[in-house]
Image (cartoon, rainbow, N blue to C red):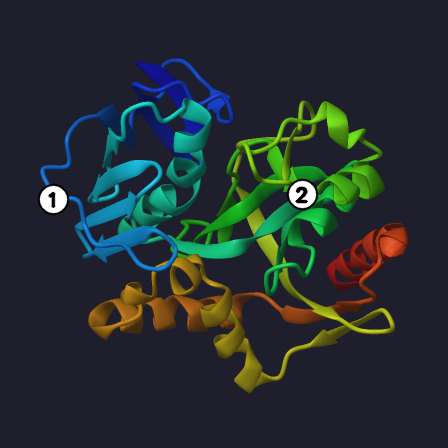
């Protein structure tokens, strides 16, 4: 078995997961094993996927990959289809599947990217294509610590009394032009996430730490002709947090009944704990340095 740490959890896996931070001797909070799901092949939606979720067990299936059973946030059983490559299998495993385990463990997951500035976590969320990963990459290039890209995990019940962000793993997912503009990389030297996908995997060989970081601010990206940072109105805050939560985007079935009430309470607690701000900026890669400096200035101004 391989041993890793991610999202503040020790992971024991029968599968190699090179994206994660290897760490021997960790207690296994989550165990990943191969096995049969014991279910019939489900009827998938227009995306070729099927999700069935309860507070204790989740079943996730992709017709090109196979099925995953997540139990009580502690055990993930992978029922892969014949011939599926590990790289393809890891895409849902380290994203949607892990988000189900995170949800079962009581954490709040946001669909976004995060860096640490002066030891405080800042999170970038927004609609698809707004530049969450690119914004995080531009700050990472300026020497700030990468914390997460895609799934941001927050502990709303940390013993410190403040929301804590548990880092994911040292990888950014960037389109070729974004990798070149934000990090100065040659996109052709970066591997694709999978065949047929333009996004590239950019490993953060330095500037990553698995240690939890207190949350400072959440920025919601929005396209605008001019740069600006503005506080959200109170009535906007909860709506945005629900819209940007990983469960709402991927697993809409979570937001029903008791699960919806629990999720709402976490969002309210988060809105009461940290500022939520619009981060308005032009949609051009040439202004990334100015964008990064704007965020740095805002974080440091509100810290003084």
Indicate the quadrant containing the N terminus: top left, top right, bottom left or bottom right.
top left
Name the spot of residue 263 as percent of width and height, x first: 34, 67
Q: Residue at x 84, y 58 (%)?
A: 284
Frontmost of labels 2 and 1 is: 1
Q: For numbered disc 2, what is the local secondary structure?
A: loop
Q: Give the quarter of the image for residue 222.
A: bottom right
Q: Residue at x 66, y 45 (%)?
A: 115
Q: Which residue is mark 2?
A: 119
Q: Residue at x 68, y 37 (%)?
A: 145
180 left or right, relative to 67 = right
Q: Which residue is mark 1?
A: 40
Q: Residues within 10 Å of mark 2 (few under 14, many from 20)?
A: some
Name the spot of residue 162 as percent of width and height, x first: 50, 56
Name the spot of residue 47 as percent of width and height, x first: 39, 55
Q: Residue at x 46, y 27 (%)?
A: 87
1 left or right, relative to 228 = left
Name the spot of residue 277 as percent of width and height, x first: 67, 70
Looking at the picture, tell me which residue is in the foreground, 35 or 122.
Answer: 35
Earlier-in-chain disc, 2 versus 1: 1
């Amino acid at each position: 078995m391989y041993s890793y740490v991610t999202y503040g959890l020790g992971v024991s896996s029968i599968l190699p997961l090179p994206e994660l931070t290897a760490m021997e001797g960790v207690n296994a909070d989550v165990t990943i094993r191969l096995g049969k799901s014991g279910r019939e092949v489900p009827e998938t939606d227009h995306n070729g996927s099927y999700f069935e979720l309860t507070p204790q067990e989740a079943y996730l299936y992709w017709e090109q990959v196979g099925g995953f059973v997540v139990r009580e946030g502690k055990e993930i059983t992978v029922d892969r289809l014949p011939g599926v490559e590990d790289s393809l299998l890891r895409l849902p495993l380290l994203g949607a599947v892990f988000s189900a385990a995170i949800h079962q463990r009581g954490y709040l997951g946001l669909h976004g990217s995060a860096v640490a500035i002066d030891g405080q976590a800042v999170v970038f969320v927004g609609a698809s294509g707004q530049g969450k990963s690119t914004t995080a990459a531009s700050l990472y290039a300026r020497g700030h610590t990468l914390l997460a890209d895609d799934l941001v995990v927050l502990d709303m019940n940390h013993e410190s009394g403040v929301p804590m962000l548990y880092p994911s793993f040292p990888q950014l997912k960037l389109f070729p032009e974004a990798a070149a503009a934000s990090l100065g990389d040659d996109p052709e030297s970066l591997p694709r996430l999978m065949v047929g996908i333009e996004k590239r995997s950019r490993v953060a060989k330095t500037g990553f730490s698995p240690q939890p970081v207190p949350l400072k601010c959440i920025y919601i990206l929005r396209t605008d002709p001019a740069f600006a940072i503005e506080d959200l109105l109170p009535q906007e805050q909860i709506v945005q947090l629900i819209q940007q939560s990983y469960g709402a985007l991927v697993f809409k079935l979570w937001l029903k009944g008791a699960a919806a009430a629990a999720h709402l309470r976490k969002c309210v607690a988060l809105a009461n704990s940290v500022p939520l701000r619009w981060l308005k900026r032009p949609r051009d890669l040439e202004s990334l340095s100015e964008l990064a400096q704007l965020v740095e200035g805002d974080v440091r101004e509100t810290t003084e």
